[in-house]
Image: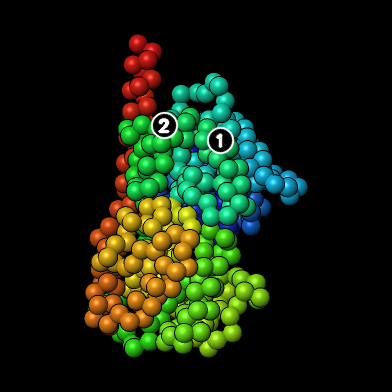
Amino acid sequence: MNIVFATDGIYPFVLGGMQKHAAYIIRHLAGTEHKVDVLIPNHGVSNAEEAESRFWGNVRPDNIRFHVIPYPKTPRFPGHYVVASYLYSRRITNYFSHKISTIDILFGKGYTLWHWLARQKRPQIPVIVQLHGLEMFQPAFAIKEMLHKMLMRIPAVPIIRLTDYIFSYGGEVKEILRKQGKSEDCIFEQYGAVDDFWLYPEPFPKENGMIRKFLFVARNEYRKGYHLLHETLQELVTDNETFEIDIVGELPKQLELQDPRIRYHGNLSAEALKSLKDRCEVLLLPSLSEGFPTIIIESMARGICIAASEVGAVTKVIDKDTGWLLQPGSSRSLKDTMKAIIRTPEPDLHRKQMACYQKVLHNFRWESTVNQLVSHLQSAAHDYRERITRQQS
């Protein structure tokens, strides 16, 4: 099968959950017989030769080929990202229409195939899109956030309507697609996964001490909920609770709290983050909206249990056995949960950690996930050809 995989960036050239997800897919498709043309923007790289050299190192697979497409430069104004996304998607259409001859299926991340889908006349190539968490359709908790989500719906609505098939997380995310009019037979459930790098070495049991050790990892973005954590930590410090927390991600200095129980690390490499996770027990994810955060399963693979907002597809992984569910947008819910965790006996905490580890081990490994993804792509291409044949006969 000849696959064109359009992305808005891949890790490590671009940081982000979608970009890391794309990078994992590419690395594991390298072990298949399928030919994949990967389209990436010139973020962090200038040409395909440089991208392949830095991504693969000395051993490059024969079936994966990179193409670097210049990302449009637009002045910053409200909605500039949407405009740039459309212009980039148009460049993608023009590129593969002229440069890539044999295509069995188009697979696009985010808004990359927006222009291709919006054209009235399209060649008979099936399109499958992955919009990840569909946060733009989830509740907003501030006016600025609401306006941002409305802008993001401008490309999302036509892409959902026009794409032949769509990858979706389950739970609330899949329900959003149904409400947007997507039929069940056009939706494929597909989740993130972890590779063996993140798996805690056997035998699993971690030693938990008397002091509960929390972890928070996120960008300085409103929907990630650091403002809720900041308020909660202030109250826990005032209440003189016994805990420790490591906070990873770039934050303005004025948002840092001065207390020996709270440690700020800035951005960390994967190796440094893995080492840090081995000292922590509970990941906090008080997000206002999410899809299926990779940080959850990567942390579970290190034997960390989770306290996360009940948003997106989080409930596909987190329940009473693997952690705690938070009320979205509520610092009170976060505070009460953290206090409950602080008082959780070590045996009870260990049971949750073990449940997290086992769940990842048996359900969220990249090898099986990519096999399932390829199966979906093949099914989409086959079903599409049969549909076109019936229409023409």
Q: Residues within 10 Å of mark 2 (few under 14, many from 20)?
A: few
Q: Position of residue 296 (x, y in %)?
A: 39, 64
Q: Position of residue 305 (x, y in %)?
A: 34, 71
Residue for point 47% across, 71% down: 216
Whether residue 40 sits left or right of residue 133 in the image: it is: right
Q: Which of labels 1 and 2 is toward the front?
A: 2
- Report whether residue 47 is seen: no
Q: What is the number of the mark on residue 181?
A: 2
Residue for point 47% across, 31% down: 161
- Farthest right residue? 75
- Report whether residue 250 is seen: yes
Whether residue 100 sits left or right of residue 172 in the image: it is: right
50 w.r.t. 326: above or below: above
- Farthest top residue? 393
Q: Residue 3, located in which quarter of the rendered image?
A: top left
Q: In what quadrant of the picture does the C terminus appear?
A: top left
**Which of 268 and 222 lies nearest the eye of the viewer?**
222
- Check disc 2 and give the amino acid type: Gly
**Which of 318 and 367 lies nearest the eye of the viewer?**
318
User: Mark 1 = which residue?
Assistant: 114
12 w.r.t. 373: above or below: below
333 w.r.t. 95: above or below: below
Q: What is the number of the mark on residue 163?
A: none
Residue for point 61% across, 71% down: 251
